[in-house]
Amino acid sequence: MVSIGLIGCGKIAERHLRAYAALGGVTVHLYDVDGDAAARRAREFGAAVSASLDELLARDDLDAVDICVPTPRHRELVVAALARDKHVFCEKPLCASRADARAIHAVAVHSRGRLMVGYPYRFYPAMQHVKQVLGAGAIGRPHLALLRLGGRGDAAAWKHRQEHGGGAILEMMVHELDLARWLFGPLRSPHVLFKRTLLPVRQIGSVRTQADAEDCILARLEAGSVQILCQADLATPSYMHHLEIQGENGSIFSSILDYLPTQVVLKQARGGFPAGASVRSFAAVNVFELELGYFLRVIRGEALPLHANDEALELTGIVEDLRAEPDLPGTASGDMVLAAGGE
C-alpha cells in the first residue's frame, strides 16, 4: 500500500483522487489551507485530513506528496517535501522562474525522494503514436510544427490573475512546450508573436472576475531545424487541441482528443508506413490514471520519473521569458471594459 499526501483540494485534486481510487493500493491524506475544502474531499473519497502542512509532512508512513496548488506555491511545497525525502508529483509547471527551478534542484540532488512534474499529454495514445512515427523517420526531417490548445478558462478566478500564477502560458502553453520538447528535443529562441487579454472580465460561476493575465498567446520557438509555432488560449468555448508536423516526406495531423483522428500523409512509403494517407483513431483514456499510475511505479522504484531536471529548468526558463515579454499594444484594460459595462 502506497501512502500519498495530497496538497490542495480543488478541481485537479478531484481528478487525482479519482485516479488513485481507480488504480487501487493507495491511501490518501489531504491538506488544504481551506479546511472546509479538505473536509469535503475527505468525505467524498474516504481520505484522512491533516490539520497543517507540517503535520502532513511529518507522517512516518507518508511515501509521497502530490501537489495540486497554483504555481506560485510550488517551490515552497516541493522543497519542503523533498527535504523530508518524500517522492513528489507536482502539477505543471514545476515553477515559473529559473531561480525557483535551481532552488528545487539544489534540494532534489540530495533527497532520497524522486520528483516528477505532471505533463499528462505525453501519455495520450495519439501522442505516443506521433512520437513513434517521428522516430521511424516516416515523414523525413521535420521542419515545421504547429501546436494549438484552447479552453474555456471558467474553472476558477485565480487562473486569470497574474499574482496567482494564472494566464494562458502557465495554464495551457506549458503543455505544448513539453510536447515540443519531448518530440523534437531542446527548445531555444522563444519569442512572443501575439499576447493579449482578450476577455478582461470573466464570468466564473455566478461571479464576474476582472482578469489581468493573458488569455491568448502565440509564440515561436526552435528545436534543431524545426520551426515551432505554439498558440494557446483560455477563450475557446470548447476544449480543443491540435498538432500538425510537416516534414520533407510528409505530414502528421493529430490531437489528444479521441474524436479527432490521427493522419500520417506520406509522399513515399517510409518507416513501415505506406505512401498516401494512413488514418488511425484512438479510444478515450483516463490520462490521469496513466500518468499517476506511472508515478506509483516511480515510488515503487520500478520506473524513473519523467521530465528530468534539465528539461524542467529549460522549460521554466522559456516560460519565464515568454511571461516577461509585454502584451502587444492596444490590449484593453479591465477597467475600461468594466466602465463600458456600467459596473
Image: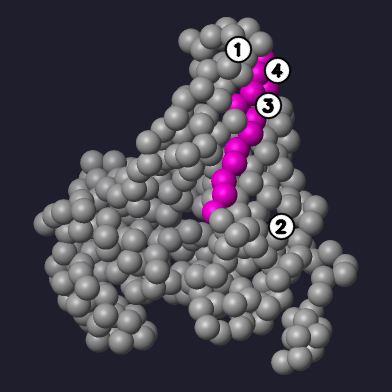
Mark in front: 1 vs 2: 1
Q: State the residue in front, 255 or 129.
A: 255
Q: Tell me residue 308's x, y (percent).
A: 45, 47
The furthest residue to the left:
1
- Give the left or right position of residue 149, taking residue 283 as reference: right
Q: Tell me residue 79's x, y (percent).
A: 40, 69
The local secondary structure at tag 4 comes to loop
Q: CA distance from mark 1 to mark 2?
A: 34 Å
Work out whether 321 lies above or below 302: below
Q: State the residue in front, 101 or 138.
A: 138
**Residues in magenta?**
239-252
Q: State the residue in front, 272 or 29.
A: 272
Q: CA distance from mark 1 to mark 3?
A: 14 Å
Visible residue check, residue 249? yes
Numbered label attached to residue 276: 1
The residue to which callout 3 is attached is: 246
Marks 4 and 1 close (CB-CB < 8 Å): no
Work out whether 128 lies above or below 219: above
Residue type beneath disc 2: Ile
Q: CA distance from mark 2 to mark 4?
A: 28 Å
Marks 1 and 2 close (CB-CB < 8 Å): no
Residue type beneath disc 1: Gly
Numbered label attached to residue 248: 4
The residue to which callout 2 is attached is: 217
